[in-house]
Image: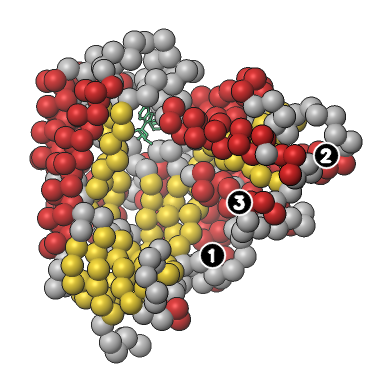
Amino acid sequence: MNERDSEALAALLALSGYEVVEDEAAADVILLNTCAVREAAEVKAIGKARHLLEHREETPQLKVGILGCMAQNRGRGLLKNLPGLDLIVGTQQIHHIPEMLDQLFAQRDTGKALVELSSEEGSQNAISRHTPGKKPCAFVSIMQGCNMRCAYCIVPKTRGRERCRPLADIVAECRALAASGTREVTLLGQIVTSYGRREMPVVGGKSPFVQLLEAVAAIAGIERIRFTSPHPRGFRRDLAEAFRDIPKLMPAVHLPVQSGSDRILKAMNRPYTAEKYLEIVAMLRDAVPDICISTDAIVGFPGETEEDFRATAELFEAVRFDMAYVFKYSPRPGSPLDAAADDVPEAVKETRCNALLDIMGRHSLARNQSYVGKVEKVLVEGPARRGEGRLMGHNPGARKVVFSGGADLVGKIVPVRIDSATVTTLEGSLQLPLPS
Ligand code: 5AD
Ligand code: SF4
C-alpha cells in the first residue's frame, strides 16, 4: 500500500516539474513514506531520517519529509527525535505535498516544519495516478482505512475510517493501465471484502467486491487480477467461486488468520474462529482445488500460552500454507491494546516464530517441488536481481520464477518449464517456440 501511495505521489510531483533521481545524494527532496504496523519499521525510518538530517551540511537545500502512518501517529512528536525535519504529512494529505514543497522552497529558511495531519473527505480518490511508462504489474488502490478494531493494530488510527473509491473510477484506472501496457493489476485495500458494502447492492448473489472483480476482468489487455487483503469475516461463497469463474483472477489468495487459537482471536477482536477459517479454506479448495493460500500470523500476542500457540501450529499443519508472514507481537502506542502488558518473552516469541516458519517452509517447499517438470505461465516483470540475462516473473500461484531470456519478453506471459525449486523461488527454462 505504501509502495502504491509513493508511486502516486511521484506521479503527482512529476506534474509539478519534479523528477525521480536514482542517487539519493543528487536529491533536493527526500520523502520517507513510513509504516507504523510494527516498532521495527518505525525504528528503521527514524534511523534513516536522522542519518539524512545529520549529513545535511553537504546538501543544505535538501528538504526531508516523513509521510504516511508513522507521521500520522506521531505527528509533531517526531520533531523531538528529528529536529530539522521539513515536512510531516499524514496519510490523507499526501496529495497536497506538491503545494507544500512549493511553499517550503519559496519561503526563506525559517527552520519551521510544515505539518499536515488532517483527515480529508474524498482523499481515497487521490491515489489514482501512475508514473508514465510501461509496467507489467500495477497496484490499484480501491479503498482506504479500516473500520475494524483488531486489538494489536494501529492502522484504523493512522488510515482512518473505511472509504471506497467508485467502481467506475477504479475500472477507468485499470483501463488506462491496460492501454499503457500493464497486464496484471493487484487491487489494494485494508479489507477488500468490505468494498462497496455500504454504497452498492448485492446483485445476483454477488457482493460489490465480486462485481468489481468482474468489471476489471472485462477490460481487454488486463490478463491477470490479484487482490490483497480479504478478511475472513467477509469471505463468502461468491468470492470463492469468483476464483473458479473469473479466469483472469489468479489462483492465489492472501487470507490473514493471525492466530489459530479461538481464545486469542477473541482477545485480538478478530470476529471468527479457527474452524470458520478452515471452512473458508475448504470452500476455496472446493472451488479451485490447487489454489495457493498464504497468510499473516502474529506470535506472542499478550497472554498467548503454549496451548494457544499449539493451536496456531496445528492450523498451519492443517491448511498447509504456501506462504506466510509471521510476526512477533509488537506493542503499538495508540492501538486498542496500547497499555497492555507485552508479556510473552522475546525468546519465546522468537521460538514460536521460527516454529511456524519451519512448518510453512516445509509445505511451501513441497508445493514448489510439485511444479518441477511442469510448464508454468509466467508474466515477465523484468530482469532478475541476480544473473546476467536472467528474467523474473510470477506464475499464476504467485510463486517467483527465474529463468533466462531476452529483455523483449518483459510484459509478456510466457511458458516456462520448472527445473528446480526452493522455498521461495522456482527456476526454469523458457519453452520455445513461444505461442503466437
Ligand atoms: N505486532 C505484530 N504484527 C502486527 N501486525 C499488525 N499489527 C501488528 C503488531 N502490533 C501484522 C498482522 C497484519 C500484518 C500486516 O501485520 O499480521 O496482518
Ligand atoms: Fe488492522 Fe484488523 Fe483493520 Fe487489518 S482488519 S487493518 S489487522 S484493524
Q: Height in image: 181 above or below 270?
A: below
Instruction: State how far apart marks 1 and 2 are (Cα).
Output: 32 Å
In the image, what residue occupies the spot 18% across and 51% down?
Answer: 364
In the image, what residue occupies the spot 67% across and 39% down?
Answer: 55
> On the picture, is 399 further left or further right than 8?
left
Instruction: State how far apart marks 3 and 2 are (Cα).
Output: 20 Å
**Amino acid type shown at disc 3:** Ala
Q: Which comes sooner in the sequence, label 1 or label 2? A: 2
Where is mark 3, residue-wise? 8
In the image, what residue occupies the spot 28% across and 80% down?
Answer: 430
Q: From the image, state whether disc 3 or disc 2 is nearer to you.
A: 2
**Amino acid type shown at disc 2:** Gln
Mark 3, Cα crowd under 10 Å, few <14 / some 14-19 / many 20+, is many
Where on the image, by quarter, is ligand 2? top left
Residue 91 showing in the rendered view: no
Where is mark 2, residue-wise? 103
Where is mark 1, residue-wise? 177
In the image, what residue occupies the spot 12% across and 63% down?
Answer: 370
Beta carbon of the mark 2 residue lies under 8 A of ligand 2: no
Viewer-closest of 232 and 133: 133
Residue 178 drawn at (x, y percent) = 51, 68
Q: Which comes sooner in the sequence, label 3 or label 1? A: 3
Question: Residue 393 lies in what quarter of the image?
Answer: bottom left
Residue 294 drawn at (x, y percent) = 26, 46
**Amino acid type shown at disc 1:** Leu
Helix, strand or loop for disc 1: helix
